[in-house]
Every structure is written in structure tokens, then in C-alpha cells.
Amino acid sequence: MPAPRTARHARRGARAAGAAAAAVTAGALVLTGCSGQGADGDGAAVGAAGRADDDGKALPAAPDSPAASPSPAADSSSYPLSSAPDVIPAVREHEPARGPGWSRTADSAVVVAPGSEAALGDEARLIAGELKIAYRGAAAAGPGDVQLALASGADKGAGPESYTLVSRDGKVTVTGQDEAGVFYGTRTLKQAVRSGGVMPEGTVRDRPDRPQRGLMVDIARKHFTAGWIEDRLREMADLKLNQLGLHFSDDQGFRIASDSHPEVVSAQHLTKDEVRRILALAESLHITVIPEIDSPGHLGAVLRAHPSLQLRSAAGTPRQGAIDISKPESARIVDDLLREYAELFPGRYFHIGADEYQALTVGNPQASYPQLAQAAQQRYGSGAKVKDLATGWLNDRAAVVREAGKQPKAWNDGFFRNGAVTGDKGVEVEYWTGKEYGARQPVEYLREGRKVVNVNDEYLYYVLGEPNDFTYPTGKRIYEEWNPLVLRGSEAVPKEYSDQILGGRFAIWCDLSNSQTQDQIARAIGLPLAATAQKVWDPRTPERDWNEFRALAQKLAG
């Protein structure tokens, strides 16, 4: 999850008003995404320009300007008990009460608790802009106001990113365990007003089930504009997702400008200034951006500039995207890039890939790639094999990013059983498949004590063009069948391993990059992403059925 940001307030203060304005410009009280490719028409839910129910009938818009809200009745018993707010993800706990709830008035404003303006001013300005009400800074809450505060004393201890939202007597108070918790409370308020015009009377106590909740985008095979990525960040923030992975290096392209090796960069790419703009917005929305440079496979864009480093078999046949890990120069170039982007990206994590190394897909890697076998034996002993050299490569790259202050991540097929070398136990395993060389069941990683993130390709992989038997995932399947324990296929691992599963991530892969435009992708992933957000926030069986969830997503889309 995002690191505490106390030390970063000086950088963020100058951006706060801009972030609020950007959110309003992008569409206050709106979640993005719309019609899509799923078999059940999934993408039509989140982010449609116009709103309709499942029968195509228009839904009423939420109020877009302050209006007189009902005053609390002298006898609140005249009101029925309130219901939980209609939001995605659903709140985990709502204590109902009798009363009219909170809605905006001409005099409503957002305030922060005394002493909290430095910490919460940006969150306050953002929600004030989205609700189209004033921001008054550190002040006492008056009638119709929204107050933001950090928990203290006896209120501490509910866990990171948690919050309590109280709607009572015409006021709303959001109290968070940290700044992220306060921010998520404002997302609940924003959606409640969007879906029903009112924040229902009562108390919400809410927290995420998993610390890592996100989206990954393959920007290497297909170029995406900075504006498109920023729109996804805003969509993610409203869904309380906190990680965006950027896979920006692969065979088809290298998509971020480089100072250390400009020769590897594709013609279409993000400038570093564009990346810094993306990172600034992500920080303001409590999202960590995770860079990925995949190696020793998937390095085609790098190898086009350095063909002497391409892996070749004993017969001289080149292997697409694979770098020759027996050559010291291979490690030097990759490490240059890892260090460069570790400096550019301030977040806690760095993904080092490690999947699908082509030397390990043949029947006898030692015979096919004798140079790799010889290097393995020289480094690890006479019994070492090519897979041990690949494991050593993973461990060495993990050490490079760890020295740069990052937590390394790698794909599950970069870890092998029964080798002379063991994969670094401190690398977080991103589990995506069971189809790889030496395929291992998820429980094997868990038994080794490894931490795992769920990127199950059965449910969470949106692969452009649907190659290799992939089909576009549907929000319905994710919502009804998947949860973080379902790491491979549709079978859950035993609950005893739950604490080792850090969360989940929906992934966009651009294998057939021209199959859809970036706008079509944005529309198509709307409901699958919303369903993923629901299940990583609360993996229990949802109270709403699928049709109700879809209708709510349409209502929130605006």
C-alpha cells in the first residue's frame, strides 16, 4: 500500500488545488468506463456518458448543484431506519439510524479538524470540488458541513486505510486512521451523493481486506497516452484501488524515455515529464505506481539496439526477447535501467518480471544452450542447470532494486523447484498462470512462506485480441466466482494461507495491440475493474446480486 506521506506534503501542497480542478474537469462524481467486450456486455456499466438501467430506461441524475437539504426533524423517529450507502466497493459495516441523512445546501462546506490542514487539506479541496461546495480550511463544522479528521487516542488502531464516516444532524464527519483512510471515506461520500443524492444517516465503519488492490497496464506492446493513464488513476481512486502497475518494456516497445540508454526507447513513448505528472496525480489519489522492466525474457526492444546480447541456441537460432544471461554486459544494461527508473518512480515497489525465459521452454535447456549451462556450473557448481542461472539472475536483479530502496516483485514462473539455487524469499510472487515450464501449484509458493499477489489469468487477464485461448474477462464471473484465494483456475487455496495473499490486480495485456483503441479498452474494463475492486476490498459474498451491482455501477457512471 502507499507509504505514509507526511514527508511529501511540501511537494503535494502545490498540487492540491490542481488535483481538485482536474477531478472536476474529468467529471465530478463520475466513474469512468462504459460499453465493452464481455459476453455479458460488461463494459457498458461503469463510465457510460448517459445512464440507463438494464432495460435501457434512463436513470435520474444526482443533483449537480447545492439545494436545500431537509433539516433534522425534532423527532427523528418519524424517519425509517437508514440503509447503507449505495457505493462500490460496498461498505463493510453500516450502523443505521433514523434521520434525513446529509445532502448539500447552499451553505455547505468542507472543513478539516484543527491542526489537520497540512495533512488533509488536499483531500478536503478535492472532495469540496467534486461536491461543488466551499472549502473553509481548519474550522468548526457548521450545519450542512463535512469535516475531515485523523483518528487519535482511543480511535486509533482500526488498521491502515480504514475510516469511520458519521452522518448525523445534517453533518458528515470522516475520520481516518491515516490520510488514505480519510480519502477513502470521501470516496464513499462522493459515491453516495452520486447514487442517491444523500449520505444516509448513520455510521459507516470500513476498511480494506487486502493491502494491495490494483490495475496493471501493458504500455509496452501498445502506447497509451498520459491522459488515458491519468483517467484510469481517477477511476481507480473512486474504487479505492491503490496500485497501478506499468509494464513498459517488452519485445514490441520500450515506452518511457531513458537517459542511461536512449537507444532502446521506442518512437512512441512517455516523456519523463509526463511520467512525473502521472506520478503526481497518483500520489494525490493515494495510488502507488509500480514500474516493471521484465527480464531476462521480454527484452526485444532492448535487444534490437544490442543484438550481440540476444540469446542464441547451439545451432545459432535466436530466441525472441531473450537476453543471454551468461554475458556480463547483459546484466550491466538491465541494471542500468533498473537503477534509472527506481530513481524516477518514488513508490515502494519495483517489478522485475522473470517470466517466460525462452531458454527454459525447450526439452533439454543444457544441450540447447550450452553457454548457459557452462555459466551455471561455473557459478553454482557441477550440478547446476540453466534454471539455476535464471534463478540467480532473478536474485541479482532483486538485489539491485532492493539496494535502490524498493520491494521487488516477480512473476510466479520465475521461481523453480528443486534447484541448486533458491529464488529470493523476499521477492513478492505475482501469481498469474499454471501453464509455465515446471508449473507449480500456488500452494507450493505459500508453503515456502512466500507472499503472493493474485493476478489469476482465468479471471483477471484482459488480453487484446483474445489470443492463446484467452477470453475477455467479465465482471459477472469476477463478482460471483473469484476472490483473492482463487489464485489459479477456479479453485481456492486453503484459508490458512490467507494472510500471505496480499491482494489482487486486474491486468490489461496488449498482445494483439491493434485489436482495440485505448478508448475501447477503457470502456470495456469498467465493470470487470469495479468487480475486482469489490472483491479485494471485501472478499465475502456480496449482498447485492449481479444485476443490482451492475445497475449501481451504471448509476454511478453518470
Image (tube, grey):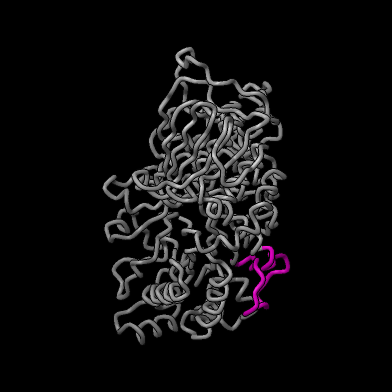
Q: Residue at x 40, y 33 (%)?
A: 93
Please name the residue shown 34% across and 44% down the image: 154
Image vertical order of residue 410 relative to residue 133, above or below: below
Give coordinates of residue 492: x percent, y percent. 34, 44
Nearest the viewer among 99 and 246 is 99
Residue in view at x 43 percent, y 69 percent:
360
Is residue 307 a member of the stretch shown in magenta? no
For the N terminus, give its image quadrant.
Answer: bottom left
On screen, residue 128 above or below 3 = above
Q: Nearer the viewer, residue 40 or 188?
A: 188
Highlighted range, magenta? 250-274
Residue 547 visible somewhere in the drawing: no
In this orientation, which residue lies closer to the viewer: 129 or 397? 129
Q: Quadrant of residue 92?
A: top left
Residue 464 drawn at (x, y percent): 61, 50
Q: Quadrant of the C terminus?
A: top right
Residue 374 place in picture, x, y as percent: 39, 85
> Would you say residue 252 sits in the magenta stretch?
yes
Indicate whether 472 appears above or below 118. above
Q: Is residue 187 above or below residue 379?
A: above
Q: Position of residue 269 (x, y in %)?
A: 69, 65
- The total number of labels drawn is 0
Residue sitting nearer the eye, 477 or 7: 7
Q: Give the side of residue 82 with respect to residue 517, left or right.
A: left
Q: Main secondary structure of the magenta part?
A: loop
Tell which residue pokes out farthest to the top in this image. Answer: 78
Q: Is residue 309 visible?
A: yes
Question: Residue at point 52% right, 67% down?
Answer: 294
